[in-house]
Amino acid sequence: MKRSSEPTKIQHYLVSPTKYDWTNVANSIVKGCYMPYDKARAIYVWMAEHIQYDTSYTIYDADTAWNKNKGVCQAYCELFYRLGSALGMDVRIITGHGRGRENYKRVIEDHCWIVVNKDPYPVNPSPFPEVIIYEKGQENKANIQITQGLNRSNAIFIEPTWGAGAVENGNFVKSDHDMSWFDVDPCWMIFTHYPKNPLDQMLGNYILSLEDYKHLPYLHPSYVEYGFEGTDLLSYFIHTNSCDFPKIYANFGNSIEFVDIPIASRLSLNEKYTICVIKKRECHLAIVNGNDYMIDDEQNTQWKQNGAQWNVTFIPKRRGTLSLSIRDDKNDILYHCILEYKIK
């Protein structure tokens, strides 16, 4: 009589084993912090300052990242996990897909990031398992159990790898205290990160498929400084089935806020458009289309002012690009592009 085969059990490490006790170093990093949120922020800042990206793509675990002061995204997340867990924090590693700063539109890569439970005294805590055991073919079902106890109200998304810097032309370039990847709203996170487990999206009424994610435009969470609402943008792109958005340059969100702009990245010749912004501080703006300029000075009546709000109506006359540019400093004679469109 033939014996029935037993189900194949698979043991999978979600976090690499460690040989260290991380308590002392973790306590030194978060000294003076008492709430999980503040501790997570301190770890994020420390990692951005001390850990570089491993451009040889060979360092994946916390121990080696600690010894070498570098690692790939898995190493960043495992090190974050080890430091947070040593403090009794509820830290979890999310795996899935990511689109980096140079990977626009539908190009995706395997990636991982962090979610932290910010509740100091969570109800019905469900700790992150370092190892899961499941039957062959049941990995997705096993992974779904990992996020139990977390929801949008008590979870914060953290991207320690991208917060530290970016790889440009094969070299790692450290960021200058980039906090845009700490405590990222889920509606912003989904534009660049797609988790394998649908529950890790934490979008409330939405659960996006991988194809939905591929169709979204690349939007950076720092765009919130320009007045954009992630919830509104996500709803717009889902319901319009569009992936079209103009190119936006960061670093000027402390100067202006967008009130109304054309959403499409391509504008048409001889069509009329309007841009409306709020100036948060003194600066000068210009619409630039080839050799045509519309500058908000006293001699140019095309810009209209109503308090801090400025708007301009323009008609593209040249193919190529049209930009909204800013001269942000009294001593700066150059205009810098903030918003860029293609003119067809």
Image (cartoon, rainbow, N blue to C red):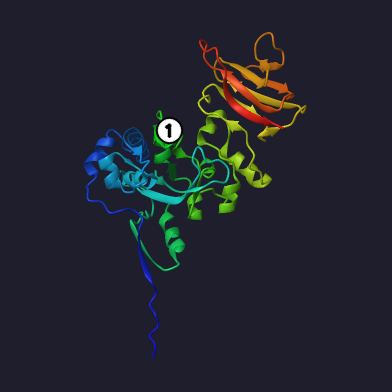
Residue 86 in sight from this viewpoint: no
Residue farthest to the bottom, as pictured: 1
Find numbered disc 1 in the image and state the secondary structure of the residue it sits on. loop
Q: Report the number of numbered marks.
A: 1
**Percent x, y for residue 161?**
40, 40
Question: Along the horizontal axis of the image, is 201 left or right of 76?
Answer: right
Q: Quadrant of residue 191?
A: top right
**Percent x, y for residue 339?**
60, 27
Residue 223 in sight from this viewpoint: yes
Q: Tell me: residue 18, above or below residue 321.
A: below
Residue at figure coordinates x 52%, y 11% from the top left = 330
Residue at figure coordinates x 58%, y 19% from the top left = 326
Q: Quadrant of residue 57?
A: top left
**Percent x, y for residue 288?**
65, 21
Q: Tell me: residue 109, above or below residue 232.
A: below
Looking at the rendered image, the quarter that the C terminus falls into is top right
Q: Quadrant of residue 53?
A: top left
Residue at figure coordinates x 69%, y 8% from the top left = 299
Question: Along the horizontal axis of the image, is 15 left or right of 319?
Answer: left
The amino acid on which the numbered mark 1 sits, given as a three-letter code, is: Met
Residue indicated by mark 1: 179
